[in-house]
Amino acid sequence: MSNPSQTNPESFFCKFPRKWEDPKSFISRHMFKLCCLIFTWRGDLHWLHNLLKEGNTWEELHRQYLTQLNQVSIVQGLVLTTAAVFISSNPPLRADVNYTSHASYACLAESLVFSLFGLLFQLRISAAGFLFQDRSAAEIIIERRWRIFWHLLGLAVPIVIFGVSVVLLLIAIVLTGFASDSDSVKLYLSITFAFLSACHLVSILGSPFYHHLSNLFIRILRNASGH
């Protein structure tokens, strides 16, 4: 008896799964389209099907995801260490940079908590990644319409937690800087964040994600206008 994970890759997703079609009921259909938009930036799952049916794409995408997740774990550890150092130390110039104020300390503490749990989630996903990247796991996931969304949500949770921890750390830095009694600190902080924001904007404008998002909104506007 052959192992499902050793089946011919060309037979995988060769036919669009019937359970991936839009639901018939009004509420379920709109919930389904909303989930498609959130997780795939498309109105249905045909794009995901066309992507996954090519060769060993399912295994390769999960392999790349686990590699990137390991890199995120390294950065998550740096965020955890940074928040822990700020929390456990006293500011050398309390009048100029006081990160022990209530608002800053609360953001640092929350960043520490999210970083800790983010590392735990990343460890769990990395440990279980070798299971759900197999072809046999994919065949189980596509049996039901909503399983693919739960699977994608599970993959997104560690990244979301990482993003929250970084944002909280940045908010703590901003609150600390603008609560300072020194005008020089406020000026340096404003210039630094303006420069970093400009660099981040340039990197986004040159990314494929921005171009895909731009094309998506143009297509939505054209459909809405009837062109």
Image: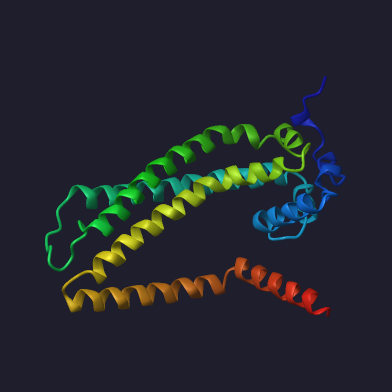
Quarter in which the N terminus is drawn: top right
The structure's colour scheme is rainbow
Q: Quadrant of residue 208?
A: bottom right
Q: Residue at x 71, y 47 (%)?
A: 57
Identify the residue at the far top of this view: 1
Report the residue at 28% width, 59% height from top. 103
Residue drawn at (76%, 60%) of the image: 43
Question: Would residue 42 be found to the left or right of residue 109 on screen?
Answer: right
Q: Is residue 164 above or below residue 3?
A: below
Give the tally of numbered discs.
0
List x then y, in percent, for residue 157.
53, 46
As drawn, 186 above or below 156: below
Q: Nearer the viewer, residue 1 or 118?
A: 118
> Quick one: quadrant of the C terminus?
bottom right
**Could you say where residue 184 lies in the image, as x and y percent from the top left?**
19, 78
Q: Residue at x 65, y 47 (%)?
A: 61
- The reply, left or right, for residue 77 in relation to residue 222 is left
Indicate the position of residue 129 as horizontal and vertical percent values: 58, 36
Q: Is residue 109 left or right of residue 73?
A: left
